[in-house]
């Protein structure tokens, strides 16, 4: 029983370590916790890009997070609403986009985060 727990723990640790080592984090700005809500809010999601794979890491369960990617002309090239009911989940998306500059927007009831990334 202890061996199975140890193996599962190491596997999860290696997955998280590889996400942070191989991918570039997309810095985001915006308001996540507005100060008006009188409850503990989950940490904001973090975004990573590795070649053409966009990964959104959710440290806590979060429902109805809208991911929007626009190109440099403001045209929406990808939009998806995701929900997770587990903690520490990474949602990966194969973008399949041409090289260029893109704008990422993460929208939720708790706030909006924005960042930029480039594919080359």
Image (tube, helix red, strand yellow):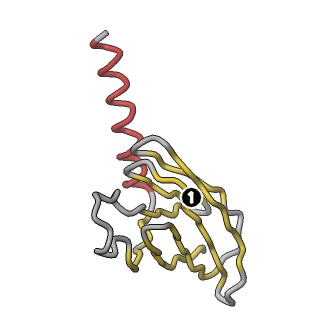
Image quadrant where one finds the N terminus: top left
Say above or below: 59 vs 72.
above
Residue drawn 39% across the image and 49% down it: 60
Q: Where is residue 34 in the image (x, y as percent from the top left)?
A: 34, 75
- Give the residue pinned by disc 1: 64
Residue that appears at 59% across and 66% down = 67
Residue furthest top in the image? 1
Considering every residue shown, the one lying at the far bottom of the view is 73
Q: What element carries label 1?
A: strand
The quadrant in which residue 88 appears is: top left
Task: Tell me the quarter of the picture where residue 87 sits.
Answer: top left
Tell me what residue is drawn at x 29 percent, y 59 percent.
39
The residue closer to the viewer here, 77 or 16, is 77
Residue 106 coordinates in the image, percent (x, y): 52, 70
Q: Residues within 10 Å of mark 1 (few under 14, many from 20)?
A: few
Disc count in the image?
Answer: 1
Would you place residue 95 above or below residue 27 in this image? above
Closer to the camera in the image, 40 or 100: 40
The C terminus - image quarter: bottom right
Where in the figure is residue 56, as x and y percent of width and height? 50, 58
**Residue 103, position as x, y percentages in the image:** 57, 80
Identified at 62% across, 71% down, the residue is 68
Compared across the picture, whether 10 is left or right of 96 comes to left
Whether residue 43 sits left or right of residue 47 in the image: it is: left
Quarter-wise, where is residue 26 in the image?
A: bottom left
């Amino acid at each position: 029983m202890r061996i199975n727990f140890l193996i599962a723990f190491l596997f999860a640790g290696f997955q998280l370590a590889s996400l942070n080592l191989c991918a570039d984090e997309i810095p985001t700005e915006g308001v996540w916790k507005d100060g008006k809500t009188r409850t503990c809010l989950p940490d904001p999601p973090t975004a990573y890009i590795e070649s053409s794979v966009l990964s959104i890491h959710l440290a806590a369960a979060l429902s109805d997070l809208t991911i929007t990617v626009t190109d440099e002309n403001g045209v929406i090239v990808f939009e998806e609403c995701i929900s997770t009911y587990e903690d520490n989940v990474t949602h990966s998306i194969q973008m399949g986009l041409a090289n260029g500059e893109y704008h990422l927007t993460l929208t939720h009831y708790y706030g909006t985060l924005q960042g930029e990334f480039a594919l080359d």
